[in-house]
Image: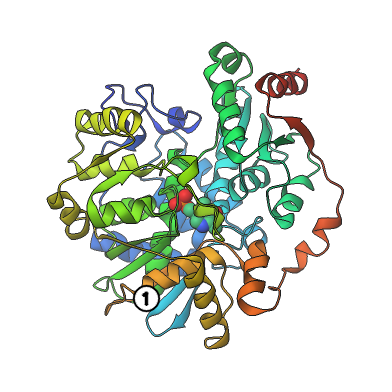
Amino acid sequence: MLYLSTRGHADRKRFCDILLEGLAPDGGLYLPVEYPQISDAKLTELRNVLANQGYAALAFEILSLYIDDIPADDLRALCAKTYTKDVFGTDAIVPVRTLEGNLLIEALSNGPTLAFKDMAMQLLGNLFEYELTRRGEELNILGATSGDTGSAAEYAMRGKKGVRVFMTSPHGRMSPFQQAQMFSLQDANIHNIAIEGVFDDCQDIVKAVSNDHAFKAKYKIGTVNSINWARLLAQVVYYFAGYLQATTRNEEKVSFTVPSGNFGNICAGHVARQMGLPIAQLVVATNENDVLDEFFRTGVYQVRGSANTYETSSPSMDISKASNFERFIFDLVGRDGAATRVLFEAGVAEQGGFKLSPLMVEEAASKYGFVSGKSTHADRLATIKDCYERLGQMIDTHTADGVKVAREHLRAEPMLVLETALPIKFAATIEEALGRQPERPAKFDGIEDLPKRVVVMPSDVEQVKAYIQQHCD
Ligand SMILES: *Cc1c(COP(=O)(O)O)cnc(C)c1O
């Protein structure tokens, strides 16, 4: 399988070449030149694989359709090492449960950091270690996080050969639980840098370092952000696993509702649907930061400035711009790289957005199954309360946004809401909704009291560079 760029760059690359890269050289995102098609017979085979051999074997089947530059036995071993009960808490890895009627929940948040990002990041950690060892290279991952991404990256990369992580976060702004999760890691290859500033300051530092090409090359700086194709690919697997758990025959369809921010999670659903998985609707659920809902209702994609990006009680969806959205738009405009370039260069980069015709919006729904909705703080509280008091299930704030929006799009087919985090990560809002604290998985008892490994720094690029330098030599 070869990969192209959404902006039409002519080079075609293989999986391991784009694994360690971020954007394509022309600023676009990588996608496979075509989506492998799953026949009815193949879907039956996958059904048997999941039932008899489990999630890791299913992951191998899907990944091997896209990766042909890692020997099959090695790839199988990487999947087996990644998706274990030990790491993800259950044999099913992503168990599906009924919330009510045909409204189901697919649990993606039982990994080490209790958010769905572990699903992809754990695989990425093993892929990075494999490929870097094979090349005899090293990589220094520099990132900015406001919570879930950074901790998922650190738990995935801890102790891995050839990889160091330098993770910036806004000092004192993450929840106590999130800070404890990250800062309690004692692994020598994990570096927490708390920046005296806000999340945007952290992101600016990462950008500034990456734009210093000499420094970037000398210190082998890389990223693990959500535009990485390997992350997206890992996520495709749980759409298959969700579908197969919710159905007994291939004729049946299901829909998915996905609490969305950067459009990475639901983009994996789009890929699964393009492969022929019988998905009816892909429902985009946003919070008050409703850039995506606005697009799917009106065709207007208008990115927001930081003044118009709200801090909400589902903070992992507080985005101003959906970094994976370009992948879907590329498909929507008929895989036309030149047209995509115009929309994202002349449009997003220069004008802050673009508008597509009503016909295109209609096609996003009719041809690609996309619909959307939004949820607010009040909706979130009401949904958490209803699920707990009437249905006996406690859900987190992001999943609550999903459930709220899913209910507006319920039809005859089963609707799976992706559970993207566990309630304990966002305890203050659960307390506000229910008047009680969420339960804490036993392995996190007393985590706030563990020794913390973090350096605090002013928002200053040179100091961050000096720190990286000191810890690489
Ligand atoms: C990252 C995240 C999201 C948003 O996922 P995207 O792939 O950015 O759309 C939703 N919920 C939680 C809990 C997250 O951590």
Q: Quadrant of the N terminus?
A: top left
Does residue 280 sit above or below 307 in this rendering? below
Q: How is the image coloured?
A: rainbow
**Front residue of 11 and 406:** 406
Q: Is residue 459 left or right of residue 387?
A: right
Q: Residue furthest front?
A: 307
Secondary element under disc 1, as helix, strand or loop, is: helix
Give the residue at x 60% y 20%. 220
Q: Is residue 11 left or right of residue 288?
A: left
- Looking at the image, can residue 387 be seen? yes
The image shows residue 55 at horizontal and vertical percentages of 50, 61
**Front residue of 437 and 165:** 437
**Front residue of 93 and 222:** 222
Q: Quadrant of the C terminus?
A: top right
The image shows residue 381 at horizontal and vertical percentages of 54, 73
The image shows residue 380 at horizontal and vertical percentages of 51, 70
Does residue 180 sit above or below 200 in this rendering? below
The image shows residue 333 at horizontal and vertical percentages of 19, 41
Q: Which amino acid, mark 1? A: Arg
Q: Residue furthest left?
A: 359
Label 1 CB sits under 8 Å from any ligand 1 atom: no
Give the residue at x 40% y 53%. 236
Q: Quadrant of residue 421?
A: bottom right
Q: Residue furthest top?
A: 214
Give the residue at x 17% y 41%. 334
Q: Residue furthest bottom?
A: 390
Give the residue at x 55% y 39%. 127
Q: Which residue is mark 1?
A: 407
> Local crowd at mark 1 within 10 Å, few (<14), some, or many (≥20)?
few
